[in-house]
Image (spheres, rainbow, N blue to C red):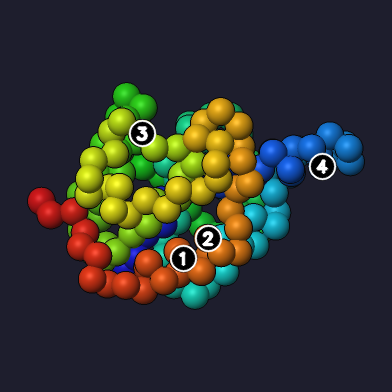
Amino acid sequence: MDALFLDIDGVLNSDEYFDKVKKLSIEGIESEIDVNKIKLLKRVVEETGAVVVLTSSWRYTRKAQDLKDLLSRYEIYVDSTPFINNKRGLEIKKWLEDNPNVENYVILDDEIFDSYDEELMDHLIKISSGNGYNFGEGLLLQDVDKIIDRLRNKNIKKIQE
């Protein structure tokens, strides 16, 4: 099994999308999540069979169910990492420990966290240029190709226990 660890802000939305939302008065969860980015994510899931695991702070907010419902409309069903003091790297490692059948994984995030060690950094595909200060461009087609290539490359070792 392959896993795709997913951040939301800066991955499934972008500065350009928020500008568009303001002009078009889009409401609901679609005002925060770009459906076109979900379609790109869907392509990754279809081509790799990877399970999607939320790492975003969205997973424990009041919007979590709305997000899951929106993703499920595109047949993307998600699991979530556990909460370990907002230490995203530790949360990913714990999820991997609890799911030992993961052969390969990719981390999609617009930020690099202090809790990402060298092993996790090897699996990170940094999305956007914002690094937590704005949303950048979000998930792009060239990112999708890179993600698919990385997930197909089984030579990248999973975390050794």
Q: What element carries label 1?
A: helix
From the viewer's perspective, is the residue at label 4 or at label 1 nearer?
1
Q: Position of residue 113 (x, y in %)?
A: 36, 33
**Nearer-the-camera pick, 121 or 44:** 121
Q: Tell me the kind of residue under disc 4.
A: Lys
User: In the image, is residue 161 above or below residue 82?
Assistant: below
Query: Disc 3 or 2, which lies upstream in sequence?
Result: 3
Task: Please say if the residues under marks 2 and 1 sit with CB atoms less than 8 Å apart.
Answer: yes
Q: Where is residue 38 in the image (x, y as percent from the top left)?
A: 63, 56
Q: Where is residue 133 in the image (x, y as percent from the top left)?
A: 56, 28
Query: Disc 2 or 4, which lies upstream in sequence?
Result: 4
Q: Tell me the kind of residue under disc 1.
A: Lys
Q: Name the residue under label 1.
A: 146
Q: Tell me the kind of residue under disc 2.
A: Asp
Q: In this view, does 108 lie to the left or right of 74?
A: left
**Nearer-the-camera pick, 4 or 73:** 4
Q: Is residue 58 left or right of residue 1?
A: right
Q: What element carries label 2?
A: helix
Q: How far apart are marks 2 and 4 (CA)?
A: 22 Å
**Nearer-the-camera pick, 44 or 59:** 44
Q: Mark 3 points at which residue?
A: 113
Q: Where is residue 35 in the image (x, y as percent from the top left)?
A: 70, 54
Q: Name the residue under label 4.
A: 20
Q: How far apart are marks 3 and 1 (CA)?
A: 21 Å
Q: Tell me the kind of residue under disc 3.
A: Phe
Query: Which residue is the extreme one toward the right?
Result: 24
